[in-house]
Image: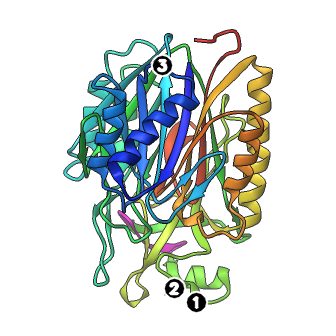
Amino acid sequence: MQAGVAYCNASAAFAAGYQLARDAASNGDISCVQLLLLFCGGNCHYQQLLAGARQFCGPDTQILGGSTVGIITTERIETTGYPAIAMALQATDVQFKLALTEQLSRDPAAAGKALAMQLASSLDPKLLLLFYDSVRYAGSAARPAVLNPSPPLLQSLSRQLAKPAPIAGAGLLADLLFSNTKQIFQHQVTDNAALALQFSGNLKPYIVAMHGCEPLPSENLTISRSFGQFVYELNKQPVCKVLDRIIGHQRWREQKPVSQYALGMSYPAVAGQPFSTPYVARLINGVLPNDEGIILFEPDLTEGQQIQLLQRSAHSILTATDQQTRAVLQQIKQDGCRAVAAIYFDCAGRIHASTPEAVLLQQQLKAAAIPLLGIYTGVEIAPVGQHSRSLDWSGVLVLLCQPAAVQA
């Protein structure tokens, strides 16, 4: 398998799409692009970008992608203007299968089932990448955005797959204002959709979930009253008062979303995931009127569940990225595999960190000569514990590898 990555930042979308596809193929020494991953910022003209890429690739190339808040390669981190990125792939012994459902906002669970049914013919799945529209209704100054919940989509997809495979991916965002998000699939641009890309054949993926939070010392916390995305009580006490006591002040209530704290669950490590964090964080989107409760980004925390209060930590982000990336690259070498390409899903909330952890990732992947397609996202997806889960405030690194003897 061969891979090449290219980026650009130009307002002329058709020319940018053509250049991206051409340069990605050239950088990967690819004669015929079988698969093109194509992502761009919300300012880009999606359809023209896709048309330009299609003009270079021809009608048979499979193309998939969508919105991103910004792009990351081994050379660049770009979040302003018209950032766009492409990865071209060619292989004789790896197969790519795409799937699309446009019923995400109506029924996320049905959307997951629809994707699984389209992928059922694959006999040897090794990896599934899932992309979905994070934004159901765009936000405004008068009202917050309404988001598409990922757990029912992800859980339904996992249950319905004919043969299980690790799932990684992202909830896509166009910008930090939660504006309308788009998805690119083959010859069309759509929204409120979920896309899947399944890899089969001679491929060994390595997936690393890298967190950026530290648990705060406190008493054991149990959710005693909740509904959907709303948590009302912890340990049978009003949730806001419990958090006030642990944090030591009430100023966190003024933030939307809360910038320094999150709720989290810990899952036991399982075989095959020596590099991933045990924590799944849930960002606090705000406080309900009259301090009645808190609003989470996802509706999957339930009554009776034990949780921890997490504090976001720049030091933890940098340490996790550095140590976990080094560890997985060393493991790939020990396993006798060759890393062909890297795909990175990074929480858009981490863009404004004083020292982006993406710089550390760039340095290590560049030294290893591994092309990188990185995008800033709303939600990150990776295996944690027994299942693939949606994550907040994390970075998910997917390394596409083959045995070193394989050169196709």
Q: Which residue is mark 3?
A: 31
Q: Is residue 44 visible?
A: yes
Vertically, is 41 above or below 292?
Answer: above
Q: Residue 118: horizontal and vertical position, in percent? A: 27, 25
Q: Which residue is mark 2?
A: 253
Give the image's coloring scheme: rainbow
Residue at left offset 51%, top offset 37%: 387
- SS type, badge 1: loop
- Total number of numbered discs in the rendering: 3
Residue at left offset 35%, top offset 52%: 13
Looking at numbered disc 3 in the image, what kind of residue is underneath it? Answer: Ser
Looking at numbered disc 2 in the image, what kind of residue is underneath it? Answer: Arg
Residue at left offset 74%, top offset 70%: 217
Looking at the rendered image, the disc whose residue lies closer to the viewer, 3 or 1, is 3
Vertically, is 9 above or below 396?
Answer: below
Which residue is more in the foreground, 21 or 221?
A: 21
Q: Which residue is mark 1?
A: 250
State the extent of the magenta-drawn residues as a range.
227-236
CA–CA distance in space, label 3 to label 1: 59 Å
Asked whether residue 389 is drawn in magenta, I would say: no
Vertically, is 376 above or below 175?
Answer: above
